[in-house]
Structures are given as C-alpha cells and as structure tokens.
C-alpha cells in the first residue's frame, strides 16, 4: 500500500512530511489547491474542515486568506504533530471514516488527495456530508490514474507499469472520475467537475516525489512484471530523459457540490 495510507507505520514517518512540503512548492499543486479552496466559497467568520490535511498547509492558507476558522483531521499522529508545530490549532488525529464532530458542525469541508487512500470512500463521504450543514460546500480532489500517459519507447510496457500504479499501489487510484457520482448518491446538488492535468517533463522535479521510475521495480518485486521488463522500463525511462522526450501526464479531478 501507499505510504500515505498509514504514514505512522512507514520506516521514516517524518520523510512523508517532507514529501508534502516539496509538493506544496510545485506550481501545479499550488494552483489546483488554490482552486480547491475557492470552490469551498469561503466566507469570513465561517468554519471549514479539511480531512486528511497532512501538514495543514492548505488549511492555513484558507484561514489566512479568507478570515475563516479551520479544523483539520489526519489519521497520522506524525502529520497531526507537524500541524501543531506549524501553529495550526484545532487539529485532530482521527480517521476520515469516524469524524469526531457533531452533525452540521461546518460550513464546508474538503479532502485533497485523501479519498484515494481510504478503505471505504462511500462511508467516509457519508460522514463528511454529515458534518457539513445544509447549503454548505464539499470539495474532493484526487488524481485519477486511469488517465495516465507516459512516453517511453515500448508503449505496451508503459501501459502495464501505469496499470500497476493505478490498481496495486493505491486503494482508490481510479476513483476521482467517479467522485461526482459519489456525491450525487449522497444527495448533493450543484455538482461541478474540473480537470487539472499534471504534465511532468522534468522527472527530477515532481517525479522524485511520485517515484515514477521505481514503479516497474516495485511491480517486479510483487510478481506483476518480469525483472528483465523492469530493467527495460528503467532503461527506456532514462533514454527518454536523455533525449528530452520524457513526458508523463495524469489528470486530477476537482469535484465540488452543495449539501442539501
Ligand atoms: C497525499 S496526503 C495529502 C495531504 C493534504 N491534503 C495536502 O493536500 O497536502 C494524504 C493524507 O491523508 C491522510 N490519511 C490517509 N488515510 C486517512 C484516513 N483514513 N483518515 C484520515 N486521514 C487519512 C494521510 O495521513 C495523509 O496525511
């Protein structure tokens, strides 16, 4: 499973704080996270919740830019400690499936790159909807790994490695294009879906974080790929970088809706 499924059980939990810090510096992430916050329609003085808040950077932006109050939840004690160390109050170490808040406690809530890691997205959305008042906003954002493309020489091999990433390395790697359906099933209205495509041409930047080059080796370790195919993937990956053709893309979906 992905490290963000259970940060505290990773060999070096604090390194995952570093991963979020590096991503937060990437222009693509900064831009789409700003849009996620706009989609909440934040109103000064009101109260918002981020579930799976990580370091709390986006929640702090919302609080500071819009004069709202924010609460955050993350199941990881490491992340909750990082949030507190950065001056966020109102952080709870809690699970998205069992939010420690009363019904209709918030004017809006969001989950950014969290639903992809959850054991039961439907149950978690049920609880997310419960804690937002009627008329309040909910925003879900995730990459959808069904949308991936990668230019290496052997396109069939590329597809197999990307398929492994989508299906085996994440619990819900291909759910984001179904978030609208998930929210509709919970009775939400005014549902909008905005795509944001991350295009990686310099794999030393974002890719050091995504770990794309290592996906084939992981697939081989788990018996999903022959070791010789994993080596071929890495060779072709390096060749694509050397010849300046390297291109990887994946689309994120930002799904927003209003609670009834
Ligand atoms: C990819 S990080 C995203 C963090 C933050 N939303 C951001 O945009 O930077 C996913 C976060 O979800 C948290 N998480 C994973 N499973 C969770 C669960 N069941 N309940 C609450 N948080 C969870 C992880 O600990 C991690 O901090």
Image (cartoon, rainbow, N blue to C red):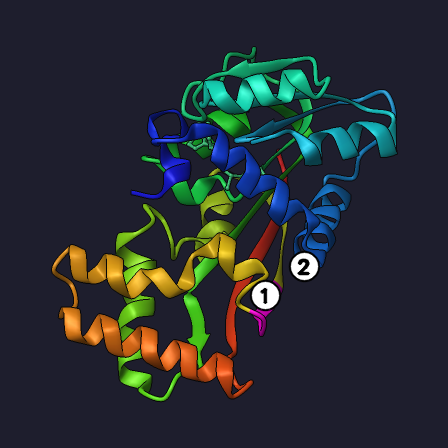
Q: Which residue is at 40% across, 77% downward? A: 237
Q: Residues within 10 Å of mark 2 (few under 14, many from 20)?
A: some
Residue 218 versus residue 9 in the image, above or below: below
On whether residue 97 falls in the magenta region, the answer is: no
Q: Is residue 198 left or right of residue 226?
A: right
Taking depth in this image into account, of 98 and 85 the one nearest to the observer is: 85
Magenta portion: prevailing SS class: strand
Residue 76 versus residue 245 in the image, above or below: above
**Residue 130: % across, % down:** 53, 23
SS under mark 2: helix
Q: Which residue is at 43% across, 29% downward? A: 13
**Residue 99: % across, % down:** 49, 18
- The reply to whether callout 1 and callout 2 are in contact (CB within 8 Å) is yes
Per the image, the residue denoted by label 2 is 28
Q: Is residue 131 visible?
A: no
Quadrant in which the C terminus is drawn: top right
Question: Marks 1/2: CA distance?
Answer: 7 Å
**Quadrant location of residue 9?**
top left
Q: Which residue is at 69% across, 33% downward? A: 57
Taking depth in this image into account, of 73 and 18 the one nearest to the observer is: 18
The image's mark for residue 198 is 1
Taking depth in this image into account, of 87 and 251 the one nearest to the observer is: 87
Q: Is residue 180 left or right of residue 50?
A: left
Q: Which residue is at 62% across, 63% downward? A: 196
Residue 115 versus residue 227 in the image, above or below: above
Tell me where the magenta segment starts and ends, as one range.
Answer: 196-202
SS under mark 1: strand
């Amino acid at each position: 499973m992905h490290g963000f499924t259970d940060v505290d059980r990773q060999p070096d939990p604090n390194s995952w704080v570093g991963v979020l810090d590096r991503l937060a510096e990437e222009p693509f992430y900064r831009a789409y996270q700003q849009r996620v916050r706009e989609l909440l329609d934040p109103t000064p003085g009101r109260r918002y919740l981020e579930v799976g808040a990580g370091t709390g950077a986006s929640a702090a932006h919302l609080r500071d830019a819009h004069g709202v109050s924010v609460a955050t939840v993350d199941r990881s004690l490491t992340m909750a400690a990082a949030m507190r160390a950065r001056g966020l109050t109102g952080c709870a170490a809690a699970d998205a499936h069992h939010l420690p808040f009363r019904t209709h406690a918030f004017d809006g809530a969001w989950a950014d790159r969290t639903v992809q890691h959850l054991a039961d997205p439907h149950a978690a959305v049920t609880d997310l909807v419960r804690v937002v008042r009627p008329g309040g906003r909910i925003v879900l954002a995730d990459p959808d790994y069904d949308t991936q493309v990668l230019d290496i020489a052997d396109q069939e091999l590329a597809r197999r490695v990307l398929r492994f990433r989508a299906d085996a390395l994440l619990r819900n790697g291909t759910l984001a294009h179904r978030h609208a359906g998930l929210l509709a099933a919970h009775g939400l209205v005014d549902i909008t879906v905005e795509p944001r495509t991350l295009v990686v041409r310099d794999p030393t930047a974002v890719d050091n974080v995504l770990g794309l080059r290592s996906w084939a080796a992981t697939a081989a370790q788990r018996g999903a790929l022959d070791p010789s195919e994993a080596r071929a993937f890495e060779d072709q990956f390096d060749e694509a970088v050397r010849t300046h053709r390297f291109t990887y893309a994946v689309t994120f979906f930002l799904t927003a809706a209003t609670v009834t």
